Amino acid sequence: MCKSVSDSSENENSFVLKETADGFFYTGLYIYGATSVCTSLEDLIIPLMRNDNEIIFKQAKDFLNNHLPSKLASKSGEFGKALIGVVGQTERPGKANQVIFADTQMIKKHKLDMNAEFMDILRFLTSFNTHKD
């Protein structure tokens, strides 16, 4: 369920979650990893997508290792973005990573439910004092 976040006029320290008319609202978040292992959104998403899709991820990683400039290949986040882009093109040709994240069939609800980092983020987002108008 997608919702929008806006400031509450009743209490400046709380948030109000409102569903948009069409049920969707896209917003951006910065997600910082708590450890040096999970430092970017890609570090969280790639294992979820790779699970049950190991062959295509290996092939895409090999392709990128052979063709991505070494300056970019050495940066974990940049390599991750490229990896998601290459793999995601098999499902959504010509689409940006944001669309791949939203539309991929490689991430199923059961994968999210079993992922501790995702569940931590979900708990954080649902911990805000919220109410409907």
Image (cartoon, helix red, strand yellow):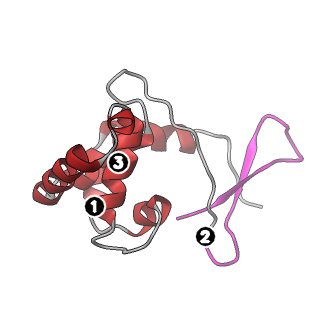
* Sequence-wise first label, 2 or 1: 2
Dot 3 corresponds to which residue? Answer: 45
Q: Is residue 40 above or below residue 131?
A: above
- Name the disc covering residue 87, or none: 1
Q: Residue furthest bottom?
A: 22
Q: Nearest to the eye among marks 2 and 3: give it.
A: 3
Answer whether labels 2 and 1 touch (C-beta < 8 Å): no
Q: CA distance from mark 2 to mark 3?
A: 21 Å
* Sequence-wise first label, 1 or 3: 3
Q: Is residue 71 above or below residue 86?
A: above
Residue extent of the magenta highlight: 1-23
Residue 6: percent from left, percent from top:
77, 51
Q: Nearest to the eye among marks 2 and 1: give it.
A: 1
Answer whether labels 1 and 3 touch (C-beta < 8 Å): no
Q: Amino acid at mark 3?
A: Ile
Dot 2 corresponds to which residue? Answer: 24
Q: Is residue 62 above or below residue 121?
A: below
